Image (spheres, rainbow, N blue to C red):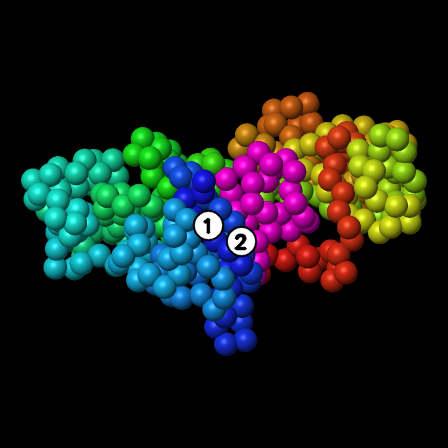
Amino acid sequence: MPYISVRNLTKRFGPLKAVDDISFEVRDGEYLCVLGSTGSGKTTLLRLISGIIQPTEGGIFFGGMDVSGVPAEERDAVYVPQTYALFPHLTVLENVAYGPLSKEVPRSEAGESALRVLRMVRLDARADAYPNELSGGMQQRVALARGLASGSNTLLLDEPLGALDIRLRVELRTELRRLAKESGLTVIHVTHDQEEAMTIGDRILVLRHGKLQQHSTPFHVYNRPGNIFVANFVGNSNFLEGIVENREVIGSVIRLRENLRVKVADVSFEPEEPVVVAVREEKLSISPRARGGKENRFSGEVEAIHFLGEWTRYTVRLTNGDQVAARVPTGSPVKAVAVGDWVSVSFSPVHTHVYESPTIGLQRELEVY
């Protein structure tokens, strides 16, 4: 049985639908990451579940009980906002111990629990400091610790690692998931960082303009994106527009501009249908010699090369004018390629995803905001 069930949830602010008819479930003990850009409705969704604001339509259920009209303080959920909301007159330790004390946990036990969580976020040495004596990142860690120490079964985290430097973010997100799992917590964690969501989420819920785009495991969101937007927002993909030329037993042939043809492992579209073919950048191979003509191998000119640490990204303009990018491991034989060289790029039909051509146009469909 799901612990949290969201059914046809809608929230309007005047003419704007910040959350638009969303339904999903979160299992007991599950760690759900809500992924989306600024303005996608992530924080509004979290505030609705917490009870801070009320829905325009739809229902929210905790353990099968409708909590839509239950005040925030009476729900078994702690909301940790981006703005920290720390008590300025209390020390770090007192802020973190506030939740247990409000539930009449003995003071000594509440203090021990608070100190244990502060060690986890590496702030036990600042237990006697006040919020105004801490950096923004430290204040965010105190807010996170207060949520973890609250004793509630459900944590609602709004960008809990957003103010931290990248190294600490990577370390803390692993610790955060470990602690949640060891404590049996149900967590909804809002983030705009796709790597963060992929790393710690049991499932990922992708939002765009208040609408649910996909709700699945990290593996499925990445390897089987539900639509063009998800394929673009999660990971890095190339998009090629074309027409289905023919459909075969194990795949189809897509005709691109200037009669270039792509073989795909998809048979769900009829001949003459306009489609968009998506290929992840890391699924493209690049060869120093321009040798087009074979299945899914095309010639093109290198327009840019970017060093990305473990990867090097090559941007190539194909002979038909389409632009693609290939990410290859740094240090591969391709390193001899320079801007202006002609190369060949290739990919397997099984590494393609095919989508219906959007009526609003490809570029608008790819827009994040």
Mark pair 2, 1: CA separation:
8 Å
Q: Residue furthest bottom?
A: 14
Q: Nearer the viewer, residue 218 or 283?
A: 218
Q: 10 Å neighbourhood of mark 1: few (<14), some, or many (≥20)?
A: many
Would you identify the image quadrant in which residue 341 lies?
top right
Determine the residue positioned at 90% across, 34% down. Answer: 248
Looking at the image, the residue that sits furthest to the front is 65
Query: Does residue 216 lie above or below 213 as drawn?
Result: above
The verdict on residue 204 being magenta is yes
Q: Position of residue 197 (x, y in %)?
A: 48, 41
The disc label shown at residue 23, or none: 2
Mark 2 surroundings: few (<14), some (14-19) or many (≥20) residues within 10 A: some
Judge left or right: residue 254 versus residue 200: right
Q: Is residue 115 left or right of residue 311?
A: left
Tell me which residue sits at (65%, 45%) in the image: 226
Q: Which residues are magenta?
A: 203-230
Per the image, is 94 magenta? Answer: no
Q: Which residue is mark 1?
A: 5
Left or right: 245 as drawn, with respect to 197: right
In the rendered image, residue 17, in percent from the top left (x then y), is placed at 54, 68
- State the residue in front, 68 or 283: 68
Q: Residue at x 22, y 57 (%)?
A: 86
Q: Name which residue type carries label 1.
A: Ser
